[in-house]
Image (cartoon, rainbow, N blue to C red):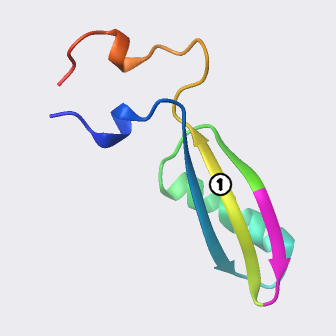
């Protein structure tokens, strides 16, 4: 059985609101969230502080141009 993540062509975006006291703390929490979700090659593409926290959009690149794409390797189950 394949995982749904194996079918993602390029990136996975996550948008959320993190409760924190500053933009710097929000950035640290966003980076920690990516690590806790075990999402590789993560970037913060948007971060805006508005009390009581930050609205943040995270992007995890599962496949970048030139990567070894699972769907090119044949039927992997």
In magenta segment, residue 58: no
Where, by quadrant of the figure, is residue 73 drawn?
top left
The x, y position of residue 2, in whole percent, is 22, 33
Q: Residue at x 68, y 67 (%)?
A: 29
Quadrant where the C terminus lies? top left
Total number of numbered discs in the rendering: 1
Q: In the picture shown, does residue 77 fall above or below 24?
A: above
| Quadrant of the snapshot with the N terminus | top left
> Along the horizontal axis of the image, is 58 left or right of 11?
right
How many residues crowd around disc 1 within 10 Å: few (fewer than 14), some, or many (20 or more)?
many
User: Toward which corner of the image does residue 55 lie, by quadrant?
Assistant: bottom right
> Residue drawn at (48%, 48%), measured in percent from left and top?
38
| The residue stretch that appears in magenta | 46-51
Give the residue at x 78% y 73%.
25
Kind of element beneath mark 1:
strand
Q: Position of residue 61 (x, y in %)?
A: 58, 36
Picture coordinates of residue 49, whole percent (x, y): 84, 76
Magenta-drawn stretch, dominant element (helix, strand or loop)? strand
Please, is residue 25 above or below residue 7 in the view?
Answer: below
Is residue 16 toward the left or the right of residue 37 in the image?
A: right
Q: List the residue tagged with mark 1.
A: 58
Q: Nearer the viewer, residue 66 or 24?
A: 66
């Amino acid at each position: 059985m394949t995982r749904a993540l194996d079918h993602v062509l390029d990136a996975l975006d996550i948008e959320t609101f993190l409760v924190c006291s500053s933009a710097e703390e929000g950035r640290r929490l966003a980076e920690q969230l990516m690590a806790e979700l075990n999402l590789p090659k993560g970037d913060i593409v948007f971060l805006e502080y508005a009390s009581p926290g930050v609205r943040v959009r995270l992007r995890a690149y599962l496949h970048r141009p030139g990567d070894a794409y699972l769907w090119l390797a044949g039927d992997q189950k």
